Amino acid sequence: MVKLSVHGDDPTLKSILEVLPTDPERQWRKGEEKGAGRMHLDSGFEVIIAQASKSQVLPSRIRSYLAECRSRGVTFSMSCIVAELQLELNGDDTLDASLELTLSDMQQLTEMGISLSLVTRGAAA
């Protein structure tokens, strides 16, 4: 699974959400409870970019989504927000499979102000 997580100030988030290619899967507001008695320190949202059983298809879906964002003028490079592309791979999905992001992909993430996070989960017993 690939999701984009963005958090920061309300006016900037609102302007991004108005032109984002998809609706957020989840949204939260600054001060809302996030569980275990903790509160969100800022507002934010998460967008699911891709879900696939094979990791090899994820890069092309990421490229397509980010290209659509760019064509709509979406950027995350403002200092008042933080954007993170989260790649989550399950143990069975990573066996004999690769997930390749090119230098061009990494440059595009950098230019758009998006950091990268990779999470692997163990295979279910």
Image (spheres, helix red, strand yellow):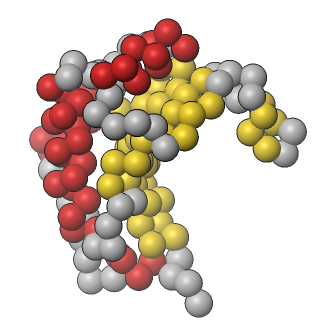
Q: Position of residue 4 (x, y in %)?
A: 41, 41
Left or right relative to 96: residue 102? left
What is the tally of numbered marks visible in this picture? 0
Q: Where is residue 90 in the image (x, y as percent from the top left)?
A: 45, 72
- Quadrant where the N terminus sits is bottom left
In which image quadrant can residue 15 be found?
A: top left
In which image quadrant can residue 55 be found?
A: bottom left
Residue at image point 43% right, 31% down: 83
Any part of residue 5 in sight: no
Residue at image point 49% right, 43% down: 25
Left or right relative to 96: residue 64? left
Any part of residue 90 in sight: yes
Q: Residue furthest bottom?
A: 125
In which image quadrant can residue 94 be found?
A: bottom left
Q: Position of residue 67 (x, y in %)?
A: 16, 35
Q: Which residue lies furthest to the right in this view?
A: 37
Q: In the figure, 28 relative to 13: above or below?
A: below
Left or right relative to 32: residue 28? left
Residue at image point 23% right, 30% down: 69
Q: Nearer the viewer, residue 10 or 100?
A: 10
- Quadrant where the C terminus sits is bottom right
Q: Which of 77 and 46 is in front in this view?
A: 46
Q: In the figure, 5 relative to 81: above or below?
A: below
Residue at image point 65% right, 24% down: 29
Q: Position of residue 57 (x, y in %)?
A: 21, 64
